Amino acid sequence: MTMESNLDLLQNNVGKHTEAAAVPESTVQNDNSVFIGEALNDDEKLNLLMTDTKPYITILVGFEGYGKTSFVATCYHILLTDGGIGEYKFCDSDTLVGLERRSFLRRFNAAMESVPSTTKRTIRGEAHLLTFHLSKDGKEKITIFSDHSGEDYRTYANQKDEIKNDVLIQNADRILFFVDIPSLLDSKFLRMTEEYKNLLTNMKSAGIFRQQTKIMLLFNKIDIVNDDTEKERYEEKKKVLIPIFASIIGINNIQTIELTSNNIDKSDHLKSLLQDIAQSDSIQTWIDNNESDLDWVKKFIKEQ
């Protein structure tokens, strides 16, 4: 079965999942793919994801429950149902199972909002790399999302040297820092602030914040900020948090965006961000700390 047939099959089922169902364990494999379709757990497997340009890498950073997995699932839903974003057509993925499973988790979480204890999300050590193949005017490009678990980032915050082993984040084109607005507004604010301070400090020490890397602060679950009192508290907390990021990262202005990552009906801001990611090209000079095959294009072509 061809990739187009796979996407057609999935598109025909979009909108039918109004209730939570079993997590999909498998899906039809692309005949041309070397992957089963689950998210990838080995950064060096990305050497096989080749086009004539470097893949564009977006890293989703945040702790447990901050909405990273819902964000990826909503991006996938938009690309699948609309056939693409802006001028780019969604034409392929090496990780359809991983995307479908995250899409299920988004629907499950929405259906089980009143039962927080059963909410599912990306778990520690789980495969985290997800790919979208996009095409425009006959030219294909790959966009990669890294959806590490919140526990992984807590480890990065507490153990300074761990992040140095994360090949992908060292070569990120864009880093999205997720801020959980409910945590921002309640007693978890101080803990979140301290954890992000530790994480940002370790990331800076590892040389993550390069001049070419686009940094964005994503305030998620904005739909809970309703009345004037909450809006005032929200703005006050933002004024505390944003300078912390700017100071540690070492930039004057950080671009911010507000959205609710699991809300398909109110996804205009997310769509704008997804379109910006889709039309962006990688301009990073690759870091190869471990002398592994990180220059995907040159080394892969040379080997072939």
Image (cartoon, helix red, strand yellow):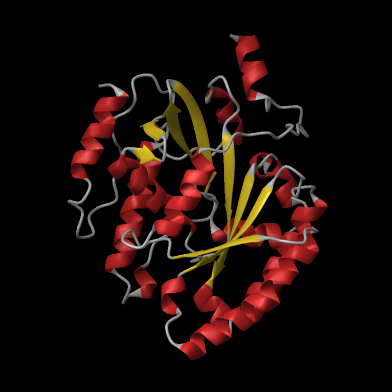
Q: Pinpoint residue 32: horizontal percent, then vertical percent.
A: 38, 19
Left or right relative to 56: residue 262: left
| Residue 160 can be seen, yes or no | no
Determine the residue positioned at 30% across, 42% down: 82
Q: Quadrant of the C terminus?
A: top right
Q: Nearer the viewer, residue 184 or 242?
A: 242
Q: With 21 as the anchor, is 38 left or right in this view?
A: right
Which quadrant of the rendered structure holds the N terminus?
top left
Residue at 22 percent across and 55 percent down: it is: 21
Relative to 36, residue 118 above or below: below
Return the residue nearer the eye: 80 or 150.
80
Most extreme residue toward the bottom, as rendered?
Answer: 229
Q: Residue at 47% of width from left, 47% of height from top?
A: 274
Number of numbered discs on residues: 0
Q: In the image, residue 119 lies at what x, y percent?
A: 37, 67
> Which of these two is toward me, 231 or 80?
231
Percent x, y for residue 177?
61, 59
Q: Is residue 52 left or right of residue 121?
A: right
Quarter of image, res 154 = bottom right
Q: Decide: is 288 above or below 156.
A: above
- Residue 172 shows up from this direction: yes
Relative to 114, say whether 289 is above or below. above
Residue 124 on image: x %, y %:
53, 55
